[in-house]
Amino acid sequence: MININDSIKKIKEDGFVDLTGLITNGTIEKINECVSRPFSSTHVNGRKGYVKMGDQHFLANTLTWGKEIIEAYTNPILINLCEKYSESNVHLSNYRIYKTLPSNEFSMWWHVDNKIDRYNYDTNVFDIEVISKDKGIIIIMYLVDVEDGGVQLVKGSHKWSRKHSKESFDDMEHSFKDDIITFNNRPKGTLIAYDYATIHRASPYYKGESRMSLFGQYSPDWMPIGEPIILHARDIYDLSKKQKEVLNFGKVPSTENWPIADPTEALSFNEIDELLERQTTKSMAKRILKRILRLS
């Protein structure tokens, strides 16, 4: 049983708390069933699936795939904890279910998330503004067993990171390396909640199975709304007043859903070969498309 007051005390002291068991194994299994099909194909040209960015796959329209996903994000004990910690009503400002594949080319940087992301339509990038006084909670829940590549947190860093007006902390790793806590060798259902001014990253990993996780960021009501929330009509008829509040009913989003990847990310070289088998000008089109992929 999760004790909210004890959990808040733990976050205040360490910057994070382990809430494993809050979401039942049965719910996690149903979530995995819901997302298995969309994770089998890219989200492109009307086909619903995942957004590919390098060695990570992000489920598009995350909250539309099953009521169990909505119930996980709006768990009443979790929302109560977030609101007591933030001393404010909270809303879901960023969210995603994603897979991270082993990679020798990509590793996440040490960073904080007490910030505002806004998509810039002129430059086609997300602009970032760090907000020192922003105080909220992020959750990471493993949807598969994780041996390597788990979340890493710098214990106690939420007490001092706000003194630095920056997002990335790679340059300071030498000063906090002894305070790094790594959640490897943990079963699916592992759920970590942390103050999003706690410095964190996914630990680098180079081989093994892909890691799939559920991410949610809960911001105080004075912060911008964040990403658009798209729901399936099937799932909204009996939502509670608090769920609608957390899911930003009637509110205008302040940015786009992250990530927005280059269209060429959606195709691999093998997929291009299969696609071009049906083209009359195969050799010319193949050279052009493969050149685009190399240059992107």
Image (cartoon, helix red, strand yellow):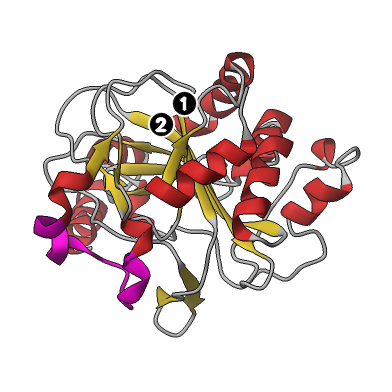
> Which element is circle 1 on?
loop
Residue at 46% x, 38% y: name it.
17
Quadrant containing the N terminus is top right
> Which residue is denoted by mark 2 in the rendering?
212
Q: Nearer the viewer, residue 93 or 228?
A: 93
- Give the residues in magenta: 160-175
Residue at 72% x, 59% y: name it.
89
Q: Residue 276 lies in what quarter of the image?
A: top left
Report the residue that reaches farthest toward the right. 237
Vertical arrangement, residue 287 with respect to residue 38, above or below? below
Labels 1 and 2 touching (C-beta < 8 A): yes
In this image, 80 relative to 179: left or right? right
Q: Nearer the viewer, residue 106 or 157?
A: 157
The three-letter amino acid code for the residue at tag 2 is: Met
Whichever of callouts 1 and 2 sits on the residue coming sooner in the sequence is 1
For residue 143, the mark is: 1
Residue at 32% x, 66% y: name it.
160
Cα distance between the residues tagged 1 and 2: 5 Å
> Which element is circle 2 on?
strand
Image coordinates of residue 161 in percent, x first then y, are: 32, 66
